[in-house]
Every structure is written in C-alpha cells, then in structure tokens.
Amino acid sequence: MKQSSLDHIVSWAKRRGFIFPNSEIYGGMANSWDYGPLGVLLKNNIKQAWWKFFVQNRPDMVGVDTNIIMNPKVWEASGHLQTFTDPLVECKQCHHRFRTDHLLEKTSLEPQYEKEAPPELKDVRCPECGGELTDSRNFNLMFKTYVGPVEDQTSVAYLRPELAAGMFTNFKQVVDTMRTRVPFGIAQQGRTFRNEITAGNFIFRTREFEIMECEYFVHPNEWEKHFDLWLGEIKRWWTEVIKADMNNFYFHEIEAADLAHYSKRTVDIEYHYPFGLKELHGLAYRTDFDLKRHMEASGQDLEYRDPITNEKYIPHVVEPTFGVDRLFLVTLLEHYAEIEGGRDTEGESKHEKEVVFRVPKNLAPIKVAILPLSKKEPLQQLAWEIQTNLRATYQTQYDETGSIGKRYRRQDEIGTPYCVTVDFDSLEDKQVTVRDRDTMEQERVAIVELNDYLETKFV
Ligand code: GAP
C-alpha cells in the first residue's frame, strides 16, 4: 500500500465527517484528531463489537471502567514512574527532538536497539539540518497534573498511560463480588495519554488515544495453553468481525532478548500500513509481575484461593491489548476502495472514480438511507414515516437532494449497506426499492415487511 492511499483516506475521512483535524479553527494542534459524526458512530460500533466478541459472548469475562487519574503510588508499583520512557535526542543546532530508536531505525544503524541502554549516536546527524545530536536520554511519557488547588509535590498525579493498572488494583474486588473462578478475565475500554516524542501518521500515533484490553488471570501452569487460545481468538476477531485480509498482518514473535522484563512471551500483531510494517496491537504473557508488585507496594493480600481445590497462589496474566484508533485506521485501510471508472458504466451516475467503503455491514455508521424520489408531498411524508419506523432499530440517514444516482454514490462512499428508495409507485403499491451497497442489486419490498427484511440482512 502506498503513502498516497493514506493521503486519500485522510482527505476522504475529513470530507465525509469521519475524522477532523483537532482545533482546526485555531490552526490545528499537531497530530491531534477529532472523530466527527460518522467517525464516532463507526468507532462506537467497533468498540461494541469488540465488547460483544471478547466479553458478552464469553462465560469467563467481566468488565470494569476505572479512573484516568489514580493514586500515584499505583505508577510507582507498576514501574511506570521509573521505566515508562522513550529515548530522546535533540539537535544542538535546530533543537528538533527525535525518538532515538526511530532515528536509528530510519538510518538502519541499530536494528536491535535497547531502550535501557541508549547507544552512542556519533554516526547520526540531524535529519532536519544535518546538525550534531545530543546524547540520548530517557524521557518519561506520562502526562503530569496536579489534583486540587495547590501545585506542589504532594498534589502531583498522572493521566493513566494504560488501562491495565485499573484491572490489577480491582482484582480482589472483582473476585469477591463476582465470584469469578480462575481462569477468568477483566476487560476495559478507555482513554489513555502518552506524551509521545514523535506522534504522527494520522491516528496511528497520537498523544491521547483509546485502548481496549483484557487481563486474563490463569493458573501459573496453564499460561501457555491460554496464550495460544488468545492468539486464536485474535485471529478470529480480525477475520470474522473486521473481515480483514490476513495477508496484510504479521504475527511477530518477540525474541527473548527483546522481551520486557515482566514478560516471558509477547506476540506483536503487526500490519502493513502505507507507511510500513508496524505494530497494530499485542498479546503479552505478563507472569505474576503486576499482582506481585501491587501486593508488595500496597501491603494487601492479592492472592487467589481456588474455591474447589483450596490452592492459594498469585494468578499469572495473559494480556491481549488493542489500540482503538489503530483498529479504526486498519478498518478504513481494509475496506476503503477507489474504483477507477466507477461501477456504473452508463447513465448520469457514471463517474471517473468512485469510492466505496465496504465496511462490514454491522459496523457501518449509517445502516439504512431513506431516499424519496421527490422532495414534495406526499412522497416526503411517506419517506419520513418510513424513517421514523426504522430509526428505533437502525442508525438512518434521510437524503432528498441530488439525483438518485448521486445519492447512491454518497451512501456508498460512507459505507451505508442499504438504501431505501421511495418512489411514486410506493404511494400505490406500498412498496419501496432496497438497494444493496456491494451487489448494487435492487429489490422491491413491502413497507410493512421492511423491518423483517432488514433484520435478515444484519445478522
Ligand atoms: N497494557 C499494555 C499496553 O498498554 P501498549 O502496547 O503499550 O500495551 C496498547 O499499548 C495498544 O495501544 C498498542 O498495541 C497500540 O495499538 C495502542 N497505542 C500505543 N501507543 C499509541 C499511540 N501513541 N497512539 C495510538 N495508539 C497507541
């Protein structure tokens, strides 16, 4: 996939109300994006589908929704205060700042860069002006804030850089209240913040983003089995729900030497973006690192006692984690299509290039468009009645402007699976024409049967 296709997607996403540049009336805010009316519908549909797939449809999952600002001791125990850093260099001449590992990646000097021990950068010059670079230093990615009116050391707090801590600190409460038995998982979706040194590539790397993840608690002897089961579920998610082409994915088994200190196995699910093969999301075996650290730091007993065997132990954790915004981006990349010459070869709707967003029907932002052939009564009235009737079940859009061909194109471009056309015959025969986005086939359907008809289409 070429970079140009990303440019097309960025401009289409803005033009069609999916994603807008943040604070644009003030000249924007670098690498910050807002979700527009269609973007928020699509994002919510993706999040709901994720929750249904990984939580609702399973007997062993429960959810939580924890705070963005937590007791700062949490981040001391989790190690984020000490080690949640990225390596940073600055140009002595133009003062541009770069992430050391990204710079080395670009110059292919250091493929196996270790975060903990930044290499010397003597052979690398500033990519902006050719100037000399400073030594690499570690930069903590957590956003700092103050709780309450006094800004001093005692009121310092952090915006959460990840969700996992909220699940670990509530582990005991979940077990006690829900009587969950290992193996079981806690899931969460929520906003996180990282002060990235170099954000960019549209919504791929931003400073404020959403994560969806599960902490899945298992018996220490069983982590390998569960890790493999989760790998299978992740593949099933991409193929069955997002309907992605798995040829665009690469499951990268992280080499032992590159594993985080708490992990014994990690698989990065990478994707062939227009800007290269990069991380999409991950699956990590976190051992008992987190519960142990929180036990030590809080002095609370977070051990688990099996209600049947009576065995007492600290559960180990398998963690599947998804970035919502990267998932959203991949959904666009997988299903946005430009058709040269258009799909209609005749008539006024013939176009040089047609855009069709072939997003899975259940995820589409608008499910049904209602298109009356005339703006006047009594067609308009009938079309409104049909929309009111469908609105309780489906996100609908009403469009009465432009030729019918143009209106179909507009709906194809935003991924609407079905268009309902109300014509003059509808007044007599009480039927409408339903057009399918993908096949472009049209069917005459009785208005009273429209709900049942559509129900069979969104399974
Ligand atoms: N609890 C594990 C954890 O937070 P992570 O790999 O650091 O893991 C989770 O982050 C996911 O969040 C990533 O797999 C990626 O999809 C997404 N992500 C990470 N940094 C991001 C950023 N700056 N902008 C957008 N998404 C990001």
Image (cartoon, helix red, strand yellow):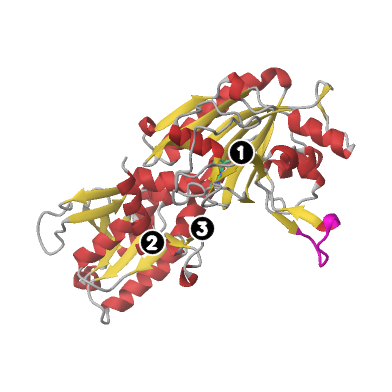
Kind of residue indicated by mark 3: Ser
Residues rendered magenta in the picture: 146-154
Q: Is residue 378 above or below residue 268?
A: below
Q: Secondary structure at mark 2?
A: helix
Distance from label 2 to label 3 (Cα)? 13 Å
* Residue 118 position in % (x across, y down): 62, 32
Q: Can you identify the residue that label 2 sits on?
A: 14
Q: Is residue 39 above or below residue 79?
A: below
* Magenta stretch encompasses residue 151: yes
Specify the quadrant of the image occupied by residue 425: bottom left
Q: Can you identify the residue that label 3 sits on?
A: 32
Question: Which sits in the foreground, 77 or 124?
Answer: 124
Distance from label 1 to label 3 (Cα)? 29 Å
Kind of residue indicated by mark 1: Asp
| Left or right: 17 as drawn, with respect to 311 | left
Residue at (54, 25) in percent of width and height: 112
* Residue 68 position in % (x across, y down): 70, 53
Kind of residue indicated by mark 2: Lys
Q: Secondary structure at mark 3?
A: loop
* Residue 330 position in % (x across, y down): 42, 44
State whether residue 327 appears in this view: yes
Q: Residues within 10 Å of mark 1 (few under 14, many from 20)?
A: some
Q: Residues within 10 Å of mark 3 (few under 14, many from 20)?
A: many
Q: Can you identify the residue that label 1 sits on?
A: 135
| Left or right: 227 as drawn, with respect to 159 | left
Q: Earlier in the sequence, mark 2 or mark 3?
A: 2
Distance from label 2 to label 1 (Cα)? 40 Å
The quarter of the rendered structure image containing the N terminus is: top left
Q: Earlier in the sequence, mark 1 or mark 3?
A: 3
Q: Nearer the viewer, mark 2 or mark 1?
A: 1
- Some atom of ligand 1 lies within 8 Å of the CB belonging to the residue at label 2: no
